[in-house]
Every structure is written in structure tokens, then in C-alpha cells.
Amino acid sequence: MSKIKTREEIKEIVSDLKKQGKKIVTTNGSFDIFHYGHVSYLKEAKKQGDILIVGVNTDRSVKEWKKHIGYKDWEKRPINPVEARAAVLAALSCVDYVTIYDEPSSIEFVKSIIPDIHVNGGEYGVECIEAKVVKENGGKIHIIDKINGFSSSEIMKKIRDSSA
């Protein structure tokens, strides 16, 4: 059985899981050039509840988001296609489900699930864009700080510098 689900499938699954009293945790991102920082982050996210659902941006929405937040190389992102990024996430034991969303913002993803806990990186803070939806529905935001030296952008820079 595939862990990768459509938004409609994930809504049904979450409804059943909530009836069973399961604590639902969400997080999201592009998860491009998968690395140790991602693994550490996702393992910590899973510790926050019973079920971890990861939302993954489509290729188009990664470009839109990276452009929106000012990345100079936004046109070249992501490096890996969404199907590959979702498959890597689904292969992890700490990830229960993966769903792909096309909006540049994760708000609709979060609204479709209404998690008990939404996990985000420290760079976004407790007042992240998902906070209002999560808190209005009785949920909490959990922040995990990045591990220095481990981000897709930093790894890309290291690769470029090493080949110069």
C-alpha cells in the first residue's frame, strides 16, 4: 500500500484516525536534495504525535514559493521532481503519509487535515503562515531549529564551490 495519498484520500484517512483518538502531526516543504537535516527534522516531528503527514509542494509551487521569499535561483528549483521527492519521504519509517499540494502556500494543505500539531522550521517561527488555521482549530505549532550546514541551498552551494 502506498503512503502517497491524494488530498481527498488523506481527508478520509485523517477522519478515521481522529475517530480512533490518534494525534495528527503535519509538516510540509519541498524536501529537495534530501539530507541529514531533513531526516533529523522528520524524526523529531514524528515524536510530537501518533501519525505524521508530510505535505510536499509540486514543482510549480516550489518555484512560486522560492520566488516569493526571494531566492535568486528560484527558476532552477526544485532539483528533483515531486514524484521522486514524495517517494523518498514515503520510504521513511517515521513518515506515515505523504500528500502533494500545488498551492505555493501550505495553508490549504493544513486546512484539509486540521492537525493537532503542525511542525515548522525555526526560520518560520511560531507565527508561521499555518499558525492561524492550526490555533483556531485547537492545535499547536511545534518549532524545530535547522541543523547548521544542512539545507538544500547550502548543499547546492558546496557542490558549486567544489566544482569551481
Image (spheres, rainbow, N blue to C red):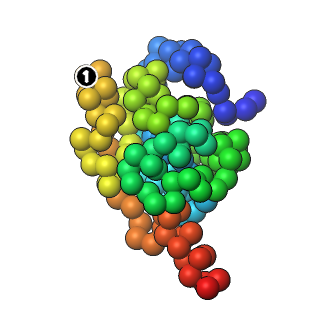
Which residue: 39% across, 61% down?
146
Placement of 2 over or under 73, stated as above or below: above
Placement of 26 over or under 114, stated as above or below: below
Placement of 96 over or under 147, stated as above or below: above
Q: Position of residue 96 (x, y in %)?
A: 59, 36
**10 sits left or right of 132 in the view:** right
Task: Report helix, strand or loop for mark 1.
Answer: helix
Residue 24 in view of the camera = no
**Viewer-closest of 68 and 51:** 68
Q: Position of residue 159 (x, y in %)?
A: 60, 76
Which residue: 51% across, 60% down?
73
Q: Position of residue 6 (x, y in %)?
A: 63, 24
What number of labels is visible?
A: 1
- Where is mark 1, residue-wise? 136
Which residue: 41% across, 66% down?
147
Q: Quadrant of the C terminus?
A: bottom right
Placement of 155 over or under 110, stated as above or below: below
Count residues near mark 1 (Cα–Cα under 10 Å), then give few for <14, some for 14-19, many for 20+: few
**Viewer-closest of 129 and 113:** 129
Q: Amino acid at mark 1?
A: Glu
Q: Position of residue 136 (x, y in %)?
A: 25, 22
**Viewer-closest of 141 and 47:** 141
Residue 114 in view of the camera = yes
Q: Quadrant of the N terminus?
A: top right
**60 sits left or right of 71 in the view:** right
